[in-house]
Amino acid sequence: MKILLASHNKNKIAELQTLMSAVSKDIEVVSMSDIGYHDEIIEDGKTFEENALIKSHTGAKLGYITVADDSGLMVDALNGAPGVYSARYAGEDCSYEDNNKKLLSELKDVSEEKRTAKFVSVVTCSFPDGRADIVVRGECRGTILTDYRGEGGFGYDPLFWYKPMEKSFAEMTSCEKNSVSHRGQAMKMFADEFAKIKF
């Protein structure tokens, strides 16, 4: 069985393949690039759920069981920003560094106890036969540091402090991060839900 991941990201493909192999050895995960789809999918939803479903519905219309995720950072002191705009917080075509600089600037006068935040990941799965979508949501709470910690990860990881491990996400190994992260939680929930489906 082929499952389409509505992404061109090789790391996400590998992650999903590992998870799905625990469900069945007969599952092959392919990317949008693998099926020759190179158009940009316009993510104009107001929530992570809406954006993930836009992507998974696109693949289902092409005839594939399609998995998608949408994720981001929600900072309490910023009323949930950057939220669905996390990847382009500092503007279109901005870098991770641009986004992190803007976040630090926005929080420069916010005290440590009020720098609470959470990472959110919503994973959806849509089916070409029209059966009900799978929609799951993982969250991981932490605080935003005043300076970078760690060299690993990507995005806001160097600024996201996870107290139970006394590390930023960028200081964790990939195994540590996957065990507690928003995406790790959501992907495990998705794999559990998918395993219940009768084909």
Image (cartoon, grey):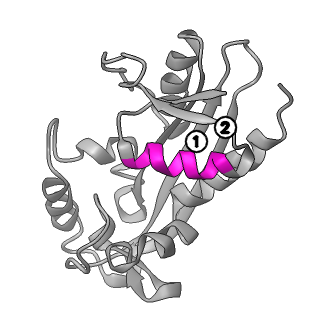
Q: Is residue 90 left or right of residue 154?
A: left
Q: Which residues are magenta?
A: 11-21
Q: Is residue 71 left or right of residue 90?
A: right
The answer to whether the residues at label 2 and label 1 have Cβ atoms under 8 Å apart is yes
Q: Nearer the viewer, residue 169 or 37?
A: 37
The magenta stretch spans residue 118: no
The image shows residue 137, relative to residue 180, as above or below, that is: above
Q: Position of residue 57 (x, y in %)?
A: 56, 19
Q: Position of residue 182 (x, y in %)?
A: 53, 59
Q: Distance from label 2 to label 1 (Cα)?
A: 6 Å
Residue at the (73%, 13%) spot, across then down: 130
Whether residue 71 is visible, yes or no, is: no
The image shows residue 21, relative to residue 77, as above or below, that is: above
The residue beneath circle 1 is 123
Q: Nearer the viewer, residue 5 or 26?
A: 26
Residue type beneath disc 2: Val
Asked which secondary structure carries label 2, the reply is strand
Identify the image quadrant of the N terminus: top right
The residue beneath circle 2 is 135
